[in-house]
Image (tube, helix red, strand yellow):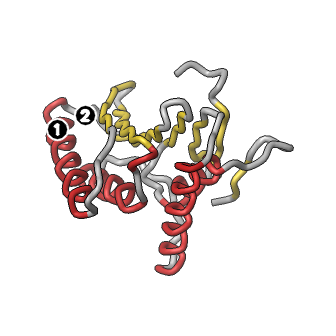
Amino acid sequence: MKGIFWKEGESFSNSMSLIAFLLVRYPEIGTVRFDPEQKTLQFSFILNKVLPESEFGSFKENLLLSLNAISELQERNLGSIQINFSVCDGLSFLEIQRDIDSLNQEEIALIIGVTHRYFESDLLLDQQENLQEEDIILQEEMIEHMLEDLKDSRQEKRLIGFREEGRVLIFNRAKLHK
């Protein structure tokens, strides 16, 4: 990654930090959207193919089974989840939306892992440096910490973050259409 940028003079909020760390840690993620009113994070993945409805259904069932299993093992409620996809110009856009209050780092890692395993050859990935195990652990701990902070804080900005040419870009979506 070349760097993380934000509008000059604007403070870097918990939600911005979380989005930046998620995009740096997980090259599989195309975009991350944060909606403070709904208190949700939406992860988008880009597939280099037209996803058949049957394959999406199989993926969705597999992911939901995995998420239900981890929530039972952790003795917590799964919370709100929406899994959708759309197709445009030969690409498929897979969107997974989760509520912040019941989301944790282990679940994020599971979502990424299941998505990566299921769509490995078709998933568009950003180039990533080879990270050392201790760097990965540190990044995941930071994500968990920021996620917990985000649950307890009041955020006002609707944000979207994505990668472009090795950089993480985060924008305030307040004036953009949903």
Q: Quadrant of residue 108?
A: bottom left
- Residue placed most toward the observer, 48 or 145: 145
Q: Residue at x 54, y 73 (%)?
A: 138
Left/right of residue 139 with respect to residue 69 in the rendered view: right
The residue at the point 66 percent across, 21 percent down is 175
| Mark carried by residue 55 | 1
Q: Residue furthest right?
A: 9
User: Considering the numbered disc 2 on the image, is that residue within a helix, a strand or a loop?
Assistant: loop
Residue 53 placed where, x, y %? 18, 29
Query: x and y percent of residue 15 in the render?
Result: 61, 47
Q: Quarter holding the N terminus?
A: bottom right
Check if mark 1's residue and mark 2's residue have beta carbons within 8 Å: yes
Q: Which residue is mark 2?
A: 51
Q: Is residue 30 above or below residue 157?
A: below
Q: Give left or right: position of 81 versus 152.
A: left
> Which residue is located at x 25 percent, y 52 percent?
67
Observer-nearest residue: 74 or 97?
74
Q: CA distance from mark 1 to mark 2?
A: 7 Å
View extreme (top): residue? 177
**The label number, if any, that marks residue 14 in the structure image:** none
**Residue 155 at what x, y percent from top left?**
63, 40
Amino acid marked by disc 2 = Leu
- Residue neighbourhood size for the residue with mark 2, other residues' Cα within 10 Å, grouped as few (<14), some (14–19), many (≥20): some
Residue 53 drawn above or below residue 14: above
- Residue type at tag 1: Glu
The local secondary structure at tag 1 comes to helix
Q: Where in the figure is residue 87, as x and y percent of width and height? A: 34, 26
Q: Is residue 155 left or right of residue 67?
A: right
